[in-house]
Image (cartoon, helix red, strand yellow):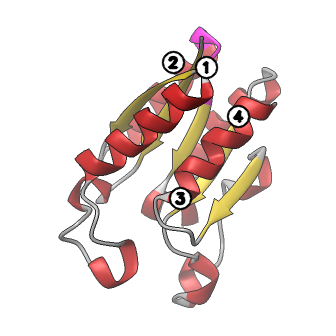
Amino acid sequence: MQKVLVLNGPNLGRLGSREPDIYGAMDFDALTSAVNAKATQLGLTAEVRQTDSESELISWIHEAVDTGSNVVLNPAAFTHYSYALRDAAVQVTKSGLKLIEVHLSNPHTREEFRHNSVISGVATGVIAGFGVDSYLLAMTQLASR
């Protein structure tokens, strides 16, 4: 079975209570369950993680390269400024693996500072604005490639 690391950045552990009008009412445990169910349906194995630490997120991306795992990445606030995270993401795609950037909301419909992603230019693809379905669409793409 193909392993996928589903990595989530800062504040995503607060899903369900943090701005539900933007991020939805589903909490992180329910997101994890939905991703795992979709992975099973598609014949994938998903490992869903969340951290508020940039260095931990980078370490997990390095782990993906070392283990040959594709990545679904919601970099959250790191999307807009973390060149260190971008440099780690490049290693995924340069090694022949896939990295799909996902967002629950559509950053382009929000504050202007959210319109720029330093990750998008090195990602295999970007899916945004579909709530939890953004993750499920990413899993579907990974299974079909």
Residue 113 visible in rendering? yes
In the rendered image of this protein, does residue 4 appear above or below residue 26?
above
* Residue 5: image location, x then y, percent: 50, 29
**Residue, disc 3:** 133
**Secondary element at tag 3:** helix
Q: Which mark is residue 69?
A: 1
**Which residue corresponds to the image point at 58% horizontal and 10% vertical from the top-left?**
67
Question: What residue is disc 4 on?
Answer: 142
Label whose residue precedes the other's in the sequence (1 or 4): 1
* Disc marking residue 145: none
**Secondary structure of the residue carrying numbered label 4:** helix
**Which of the two marks, 1 or 4, is nearer to us in this view?**
4
Residue at 61% over, 29% down = 42
Task: Please tell me whether mark 1 sits on a helix, a strand or a loop.
Answer: loop
> Is any atom of residue 81 visible in this view?
no
- In magenta, the rendered stretch is 66-70
Residue 50, image x and y in percent?
33, 42
x%, y% of residue 103? 53, 62
Identified by mark 2, the residue type is Glu
| Disc 1 to disc 2: CB gap under 8 Å | yes
Q: Amino acid at mark 1?
A: Ser
